[in-house]
Amino acid sequence: LANFFELKSSDFLFKFLVIGNAGTGKSCLLHQFIEKKFKDDSNHTIGVEFGSKIINVGGKYVKLQIWDTAGQERFRSVTRSYYRGAAGALLVYDITSRETYNALTNWLTDARMLASQNIVIILCGNKKDLDADREVTFLEASRFAQENELMFLETSALTGENVEEAFVQCARKILNKIESGELDPERMGSGIQYGDAALRQLRSPRRAQAQSAQECGC
Amino acid sequence: RLEEVPLEVLRQRESKWLDMLNNWDKWMAKKHKKIRLRCQKGIPPSLRGRAWQYLSGSKVKLEQNMGKFDELDLLPGEPKWLDVIERDLHRQFPFHEMFVSRGGHGQQDLFRVLKAYTLYRPEEGYCQAQAPIAAVLLMHMPAEQAFWCLVQICEKYLPGYYSEKLEAIQLDGQILFSLLHKVSPVAYKHLSKQKIDPILYMTEWFMCAFSRTLPWSSVLRVWDMFVCEGVKIIFRVGLVLLKHTLGSSDKLKSCQGQYETMERLRALSPKIMQETFLVQEV
């Protein structure tokens, strides 16, 4: 029976990355998103970890395949090979550490260069719950986000605040781009694939037509 | 889940090992094969820490550098390294009683050993993959001994694995992959087809010498052989895991995409990681 639910069909499949300096809480964000729990006893990531989850974005089912990477500078040469074909990314810093914030530009350059020029990135100021130790203001980070065309949220992997939102907002933006034609899922390396539900529709043209007729009812 | 060695066998092994350790130079010079065989059978837990120090040469290294560790231990260390090390202290084997409490003895010693290394090799500094290695050592020996054992592993066993560009690990990834071609053409073909670069799956395996991958009893057995025979053991373990995970068309059915294959390699079957099976295959 468990398998049955896992096979829940999806319309799209997006590859996501979680990047940012060591100790900013990348793996904890991923764990909170998938398990809805804070992982207090997690190992630090060496190489890569994974997670996947199906979310509902405006009536469409999107399967996210999330690649969570090691943060330490010297792993960069290794983690870069995970970037290829990512459609979205969470770029994470720690609001209590200026150093992790200062490193953002480097991460951004890497992501745009190696994943895709069109990668949709949401900036996450994590550890929002540690407001007393804050070193980076909300205003400052939101300016940075604006200048670099990023979405922005402050998150807490501990309390769960804004964690789901970060993933969903990023996915929503990608969907919007697909609908507006700015992103083409059929292009190689877009990081987007049709999910099994969409593929079924493509295979039975009559149903697909019916569906598009409905959608055109606007 | 430890496999029980009968008590009398264990006592026998202990006295054999004691004899070896007490006449180490003679054994190393004349009966190295026998030492290797005994490492393959597993070093008795009570002597494991001592044996690792003899086998790795860290004992000699310590004797040649008396007082060095204490000297490094007193120095403050570079803030940029201390910051990363401190972020990692509570993230090593958090279920092990030694490392369970924040600021407890285990975490303090871990800090001392890793900090001392950044002072010993300032050009290398700290690599996050060194922390699990140091933690495993600290479970078996005091901080000073663990430090010199770490030095031997970083410089003699896995040279270049932890330094700036991680070039050595990428090179060994390529070597592993070409060995796989011989060991399991099916797995090799599958990974090639899906364009899965070796560093996507072997980084943690190799850099942590499987300490975060295998069940604990297997980690110890693999380390017994690794400390005796070196990096080739790490290669062999990697090949066994790949072969038994992706080595037949039947196994590949559920690995249709790159992500599915990667997930499979992250969640290996307990059966193939079980100590007797693994050691035998290696």
Image (spheres, coloured by chain):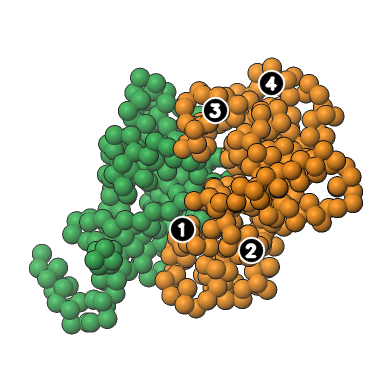
Report the chain holding disc 3.
B
Q: Nearer the viewer, residue B7 or B149?
A: B7
Discs 2/1, front: 2
| Residue that mark 2 sits on | B280
**Residue B122 at what x, y percent from top left?**
72, 30
Question: In the image, what residue occupies the spot 83% across and 34% down?
Answer: B60
Distance of label 3 from label 1 (alpha carbons)? 28 Å
Nearer the N terminus, badge 3 or badge 2? 3
The residue tagged with tag 1: helix, strand or loop?
loop
Mark identifier at residue B73: 4
| Three-letter amino acid code at the position of disc 3 | Gln
| Residue that mark 1 sits on | B267
Nearer the N terminus, badge 3 or badge 1? 3
Query: Dot 2: within a 10 Å radius of its alpha carbon, few (fewer than 14), some, or many (20 or more) residues?
Result: few
| Residue that mark 3 sits on | B107
Which quadrant holds the C terminus of chain B? bottom right
What colour has chain A? green
Distance of label 3 from label 2 (alpha carbons)? 35 Å
Query: Dot 3: within a 10 Å radius of its alpha carbon, few (fewer than 14), some, or many (20 or more) residues?
Result: many
**Residue A67 at what x, y percent from top left?**
44, 53
| Three-letter amino acid code at the position of disc 2 | Gln
Discs 3/2, front: 2
**Residue A96 at what x, y percent from top left?**
42, 26
Whether tag 1 and tag 4 are in contact, CB under 8 A, the answer is no
**Residue B251 at what x, y percent from top left?**
47, 73
Image height of B166 relative to B250, above or below: above
For the residues beneath circles 2 and 1, the answer to whether they share a chain is yes
Image height of B22 relative to B158, above or below: above
Nearer the N terminus, badge 4 or badge 3? 4
Q: B52 left or right of B6?
A: right
